[in-house]
Image (spheres, coloured by chain):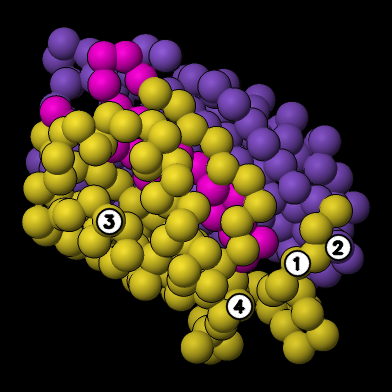
Chain colours: A purple, B yellow
């Protein structure tokens, strides 16, 4: 079992989180089909954004495209790439106030050299308690 | 490599998906802390909703709570449980028109005996092409 940082003495029972849903476009097709690069990059940006990465899994699709899922202490993150159109869906969902999901998305956009970034922040659960 | 059902001859390059973000409440704390039950249940409801489950991972947290992530041919699904308040966050994100993310969430709510279900459907990517 792993410790749940969102269930500390202060936050236990606090059913709340922040979910950033993003679309990046204008990304190199080669990068978006590079499973190992994407897996490493997602783990790195999550750590830089103060999330705790517990496990990362990935899948390369035929004829193109990659999915990466990261299981976090704070919830999860995902990427789904479409190399043929230079675009990728990104999700970063975190509970608590330590991890910075929007920063993780921005760092990933930088790592991919995305020309365009579109993000939506969804506050989930008990809204009045989310910073 | 696995075949990508959302990159068939008809849909290749179609950067689009449907994402259901849900919150279930009024669920038994015991069920929400039962990692094996949750892992099995999520896989089952996704299959029943015509999604293709490629891999499922999970984590049990201390002192309570479980995360399950499912990597789908069609994108991903997740659950994050809060047994102490009888609530769970659910996400089902699918590309293409075959899988039925809202049905998967409803079947999961049924399997958990949830008293309340709140869902939001977010259409992602190229909106005019999503059914």
**Residue A32, position as x, y percentages in the image:** 80, 52
**Residue B39, position as x, y percentages in the image:** 44, 41
Look at the numbered discs 3 and 1 and tell me whether their residues touch, using CB distance below 8 Å: no
Q: Nearer the viewer, residue A103 or B29?
A: B29
**For the magenta stretch, what is the residue range?**
B61-84
- The structure residue drawn at horizontal position 42% and vertical position 14%, both measured from the top left corner, is A2
Q: Tell me: B107 left or right of B52.
A: left
Instruction: Choose top left, top right, bottom left or bottom right for residue A46.
Output: top right
Labels 3, 4: front one: 3
**Residue B23, position as x, y percentages in the image:** 23, 53
In the picture of the structure, the residue carrying the numbered disc 3 is B111
Dot 4 falls on a residue whose secondary structure is loop
Name the N-terminal-most of marks 3 and 1. 1
Q: Tell me: B88 left or right of A81.
A: left
Dot 2 falls on a residue whose secondary structure is strand
Look at the numbered discs 1 and 2 and tell me whether their residues touch, using CB distance below 8 Å: yes
**Residue A18, position as x, y percentages in the image:** 32, 42
Question: In this rendering, does residue B17 appear at all?
Answer: no
Q: What chain letter is assigned to the residue under label 1?
A: B
């Amino acid at each position: 079992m792993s410790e749940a940082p969102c269930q500390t003495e202060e936050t236990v029972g606090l059913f709340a989180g922040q979910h950033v849903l993003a679309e990046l476009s204008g990304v190199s097709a080669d990068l978006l089909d590079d499973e190992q690069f994407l897996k490493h990059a997602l783990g790195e940006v999550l750590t830089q954004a103060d999330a705790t990465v517990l496990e990362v899994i990935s899948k390369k699709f035929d004829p193109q495209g990659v999915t990466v899922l990261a299981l976090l202490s704070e919830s999860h993150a995902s990427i789904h790439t479409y190399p043929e159109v230079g675009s990728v869906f990104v999700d970063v969902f975190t509970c608590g106030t330590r991890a910075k999901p929007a920063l993780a998305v921005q760092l990933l956009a930088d790592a991919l050299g995305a020309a365009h970034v579109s993000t939506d922040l969804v506050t989930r659960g008990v809204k009045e308690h989310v910073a």
